[in-house]
Image (spheres, rainbow, N blue to C red):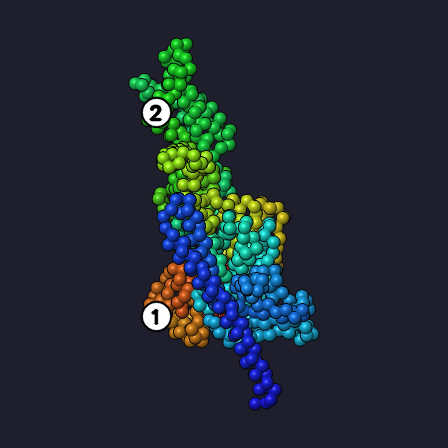
Amino acid sequence: MSDARVDRETVRAEEIAAEQRYLNVLYGKLDDLRAETTQRLKATLRDSGGPPQARTERDISTRMYTDKLTQLSAVEHGLCFGRLDLDSGETFRVGRLGLFDEDNEYEPLLLDWRAPAARPFYLATAAARDGVRRRRHLKTSWRKVLDYEDEILDLDAAEQGSDLGLAGEATLLARLDARRTGQMQDIVSTIQAEQDRIIRAGMNGVLVVQGGPGTGKTAVALHRAAYLLYTFREQLSKRGVLVVGPNPTFLHYIGQVLPSLGETGVLLSTVGGLYPGITATATESARTAEIKGRADMTGVLTAAVRDRQQVPRDHVEVTFDREPLFLKRKDATAARTRARRTRRPHNLARRVFQDEMYRSLTLQVGERLGLELLDRRDLDEINAELRGDPAVAGALDELWPEMTPHRLLDELLSSPERLATATAKVLADDERDALLRPAGAPWTPADVPLLDELAELLGEDDAAARAEQERQEREELAYAQGVLHIMEQDEEIADEERLRVSDVLDAELLAERFRTRSDLSAAERAAEDRTWTFGHVIVDEAQELSEMAWRVLMRRCPSRSMTLVGDVAQTSALGGTSSWDAVLSPYVQDRWKLAELTVNYRTPAEIMDVAAEVLSDMDTDLEPPRSVRTTGNPPWSQQIATEDLVSELPQVVSEELAEVEDGRLAVLMPPELLTEIGPRLAESLPEAVVGTRPDDLESPVVLLTVDEAKGLEFDAVLLVRPEAVTEESDRGLNDLYVALTRATQRLGIVHCDDLPPSLARSFE
Ligand SMILES: Nc1ncnc2c1ncn2[C@@H]1O[C@H](COP(=O)(O)OP(=O)(O)OP(=O)(O)O)[C@@H](O)[C@H]1O
């Protein structure tokens, strides 16, 4: 070994030892914090009993300490991942959370990656050093320093990195090459400059992040959630942050990222999951979902609600007080007009309709008895009797029933007549037929925005709930007055002269304190409340949302503080968008900002070349993102006869799986084919599952439709029958583009008929 090499190795070993000593200090600090928090939590839990006020405070403390402990254990791996050496001679360590030295005027021991001072770690380049002399990426495993990578920034810019301007290139490439686990990992140690600018963009207004496959949109969206919570904690902890993803499998896939960044207070949901009490898991055709997603459905639902506000053809007869009584068309029409004019939601305007009808019925009864003989009080009595009469109430209900969104939608979609009335102006016959389904059918994700819209149109007559709440408050007040009374009697006996309890505390205040304050986090409360509005909303795969889904999200975010990430070249939903402007202009006109991501961290160049051919056949001027790496594994294709797929595919899968030892392989195919051969294939491949449950992604081989694979990634992908994928829908090329860009290492294509032209060009 040459002397120079020996010297370099000695220096490296010494540096690693020094980093290890520092890391030991940091973990020591982390252990102290954990022990201290555990102590406090235990003390709080031990401290049982006491007045309700103390109990409430204890609940809040318990939550606070539990959250803190969760956060402290979430940062165990990769606690410190970087170091900055500045021109000034100062050195900072960067990590997952901030640690300070209390014994030394709270000097920072470790900078939280989100702190402004940590920014140069992500942004500094040789050309714009920002006072940074050296950036070091640490490679650790558990609590051990394994290695490091240095970038000396005060050298000539030309000597640095690749033309993509990557920071910490070796560390980044090692991470990108690593085997996938079926769960997304955070990227906090290797965030790149173009990503950092988006993560730390201001919170106000709508920010759209457009980027091709693998450019880190999902990663950026999640790190942005963590950054915003850190920077605007005050504002956001009250209203919470909502992250919307396309399906439960995807939410499971990304579920670990925020906890690994120490953030647990974020609500992850699909649009279909946003209606409390509804699990919308039934499926329907893409076309039916597309029709349900059109903005026109607002008009359809408005018409459907109006259709539930009827007047009799001539009159309805009921018996009241053994005499016939008539609900007349003329009266009902006047009452309906008056109720509609209030512009209140159906269930609230119903009250106006009823008041008007009871008024005219009272007059009818009064006329029968002789109006001149009756005074105001008599008329009020008649009115009250009418209101208490079940037959009259029933007849009025027929005309203007109280409706729930569930009942109205179910009755609408299962009735050809009701559908015909509501959709008369906007849907063609075959579109209307596509909506029809049996009564009581389970809900689909596309039903949820309709239910949400109906909840707005119907409103909730919460008079009864409010009366109940007032009753409870009165009871609490009476109880508190009783408590004060007893306490005062005790005091009177003890000492006549002393200040009485009621002198310092009034009953109302005491009642307020008895009321248990909710110790739920904003995210937990939001999940239970349909009308909750969030401090910030992040939407992933935003190109897929229908116009009706956008209406739901906009209602949930009146401040329009939103981050929308997606790729209009990957839209597969028929009701999804190919233009951000079209989606946003109804809500914010042109007041939204666009940021673009251009570097592909997932798909190697060999695979991206194939995908780029497909992109070039689409009607878009989007450029394919530039891959950061090559793998030397060229994509391959093979033809197998349809009838031999089940017998021959297992062998192909096994061979591919062997190439990505310990990795994850996805077999992607069109839905009908998956239904047909999926179970048989899974039977002959012990490591394979048909991916129907969220944690199926963790098995070595998973069989999925292209749509289900959206947003996910695997070490190897086998795409079966791409020719059927392209033919399946108007967005077939987009689906093909999605399928081709899921692999981090290897791509194989198995076709039965001729390859679609955009693929054939790559494999000729
Ligand atoms: N700065 C980074 N450091 C390390 N890994 C990164 C970085 N940026 C992205 N990645 C990795 O690249 C892969 C793709 O990221 P991600 O899934 O967020 O991309 P995407 O733009 O959402 O893709 P798609 O549109 O195809 O769903 C992930 O494995 C992610 O961890």
State the residue at coordinates (44%, 22%).
331
State the residue at coordinates (63%, 48%).
590
Tag nearer the camera, 2 or 1? 2
State the residue at coordinates (57%, 64%).
104
| Rendered position, 426 above or below 385 | below
Horizontal side of residue 294 vs 473, given as left or right: right
Q: Nearer the viewer, residue 85 or 305?
A: 85
Residue 327 visible, this orientation:
yes
| Rendered position, 355 above or below 276 | above
Which disc number belongs to residue 155?
none
Residue 618 visible, this orientation:
no
Mark 2 — residue?
388
**Which callout, 2 or 1, points at the residue further toward the start of the chain?**
2
The reply to whether the residue tagged 1 has its Cβ within 8 angstroms of ligand 1 is: no
Amino acid carrying mark 2 in the image: Gly
| Rendered position, 76 above or below 512 | below
Q: Quadrant of residue 422?
A: top left
SS at mark 2 in the image: loop
Q: How far separated are the C-alphas under marks 2 and 1?
A: 68 Å
Across and down, in percent, residue 432 comes to 44, 43
Mark 1 — residue?
686
Quadrant placement of the N terminus: bottom right
Q: Nearer the viewer, residue 247 or 242?
A: 242
